[in-house]
Image (cartoon, rainbow, N blue to C red):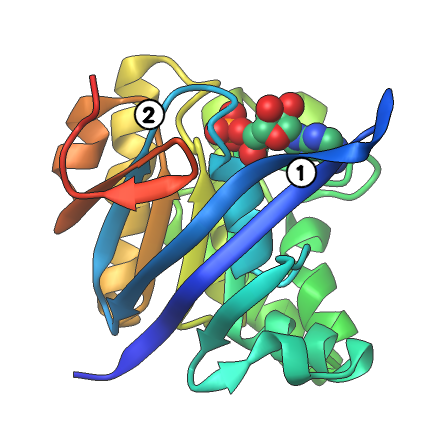
Amino acid sequence: MKTVLRVESLMKSYLIPSKSEDRLAVLKGISFQVEEGERLAIMGRSGGGKSTLLGCLSGLDHGDSGLVEVLGQDLAKMSATDLNRFRARSIGIIFQQFQLLDHFTAQENVRLPLDLAGRNPVEADALAREKLVRVGLGDRGDHFPEQLSRGECQRVAIARVLAMGCPLIFADEPTGSLDAKTGTAVMDLLFESAKEAKAAVVLVTHDPLLAKRCDRILYLAEGQLSHGAST
Ligand SMILES: Nc1ncnc2c1ncn2[C@@H]1O[C@H](COP(=O)(O)OP(=O)(O)O)[C@@H](O)[C@H]1O
Ligand SMILES: [Mg+2]
């Protein structure tokens, strides 16, 4: 089994602006790993550090110490340029609020990262179209995010990640702003497509039903990850 993500003793704290010497310790030594194609749910109370953790794992942010290795590559050892390139190819992120560009159509939103990665324009266009069809939005490519429902916007965000073919997908409360039925449909789609692509999915959720659909659940509390719920 190939390990796609390895985390060792990851620590992260934030400066507290009012007290310049004090730091808020959010992650206090996190260690775990994720294998190819695995689905891992991370649960924990609001403010517990889940988004901070995903930020560090995806290279958008970095820890104070510890190791984050994606596909055998230590993120901290890469230059900013290499990290950006590597992230684009290897790590897909789905956010609760979709993070689509409002002035771009669905097709353009899916295509943009392909263009940034230097893909051939004709290929990029075809691939974006194919992935929109895959998420059931083949006829909505010309629509702007405001012309789409929240569930449809989340599908565009999924198509965008699928188009890049990343072996590791992070999702930060991906159903948090969707109703239960739409959330289930969107996650069905993400899980199916990730399985086809053998991509691993690490998701943060408050929803125990969604967490149960994963192979494994870890709980983040007091800056530590554990196998059992703390409440
Ligand atoms: N940039 C930041 N500067 C200072 N504190 C932060 C920053 N980002 C998050 N925090 C704090 O870190 C803690 C964890 O936040 P977060 O990772 O967003 O939690 P979760 O996603 O589990 O709700 C919270 O107490 C939050 O206020
Ligand atoms: Mg969060």
Q: Dot 1: within a 10 Å radius of its alpha carbon, few (fewer than 14), some, or many (20 or more) residues?
A: some
Closer-to-camera residue (106/25) = 25
Secondary structure beneath label 1: loop
**Which residue is located at x 38 percent, y 71 percent?**
5
Residue 3's x, y, as percent? 28, 79
Residue 215's x, y, as percent? 12, 51
Residue 62's x, y, as percent? 66, 59
Closer-to-camera residue (216/12) = 12
Q: Which mark, by number, is residue 183? A: 2
Mark pair 1, 2: CA separation = 17 Å
Closer-to-camera residue (123/160) = 160
Q: Which residue is mark 1?
A: 99
**Which residue is located at x 22 percent, y 63 percent?**
195
**Which residue is located at x 77 percent, y 83 percent?**
79
Decide if residue 43 is on the left or right side of residue 162. Answer: left
Amino acid under label 2? Gly
Decide if residue 222 is on the left or right side of residue 73. Answer: left
Say which label, 1 or 2, has the lower sequence index: 1
Q: Does residue 85 sit above or below 187 in this rendering?
A: below
Closer-to-camera residue (181/122) = 181
Amino acid under label 1? Gln
Q: Are marks 1 and 2 in contact (CB under 8 Å)?
A: no
Which quarter shows the N terminus?
Answer: bottom left
Which quarter shows the C terminus?
Answer: top left
Decide if residue 155 is on the left or right side of residue 181. Answer: right
